[in-house]
Amino acid sequence: MNWIILIFAGLCEVGFTYCLGRAKGVIGTEWWMWIAGFAVLYVLSAALLAKATQTIPIGTAYPVWTGIGAVGAVIVGIFIFREPATFWRIFFLTTLIASIIGLKTLS
């Protein structure tokens, strides 16, 4: 169950990076709404990570959490914010995913 919580925590991290990306292009009330979304998802992500580490070693949980966030942020950047999908970006993204799977497999 805590692996599911950890995955959800990582997805919340992707959500707060999305909110941060959307906040940079707006002003006024809309900026505050995106920042509020960022804050809620940030706190939820950290709380879920803390819950997951009750049974998953921190040395495994933290890299998996940040890895999910990093992979998700790159994917959101490419598909939503139209960032470049170069060979080297995809190559290193693939190695990051392989590392996350390796950590999960060895835990």
Image: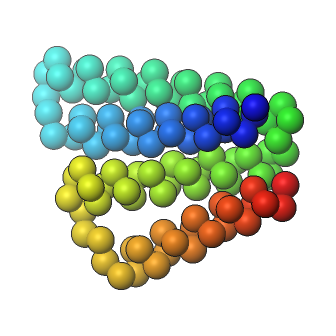
* Residue under the image location 14 percent in, 33 percent down: 26
One can see residue 49 in this view = no
Q: 101 left or right of 77? A: right
Q: 58 above or below 84?
A: above
Q: 36 left or right of 104? A: left
Could you say which quadrant of the image residue 95 lies in? bottom right
- Residue 68 pos. (x, y %): 55, 51
Q: 3 above or below 94?
A: above
- Residue 106 pos. (x, y %): 84, 61
* Residue under the image location 24 percent in, 62 percent down: 83
Q: 22 above or below 33?
A: below
Q: 80 above or below 53?
A: below
* Foreground pick, 27 / 50: 50
Give the quadrant of the N terminus: top right
Give the quadrant of the C terminus: bottom right
* Foreground pick, 32 / 56: 56
- Residue 23 pos. (x, y %): 24, 35
Q: How is the image coloured?
A: rainbow
* Foreground pick, 44 / 31: 44
- Residue 56 pos. (x, y %): 82, 41
Q: 19 left or right of 96? A: left
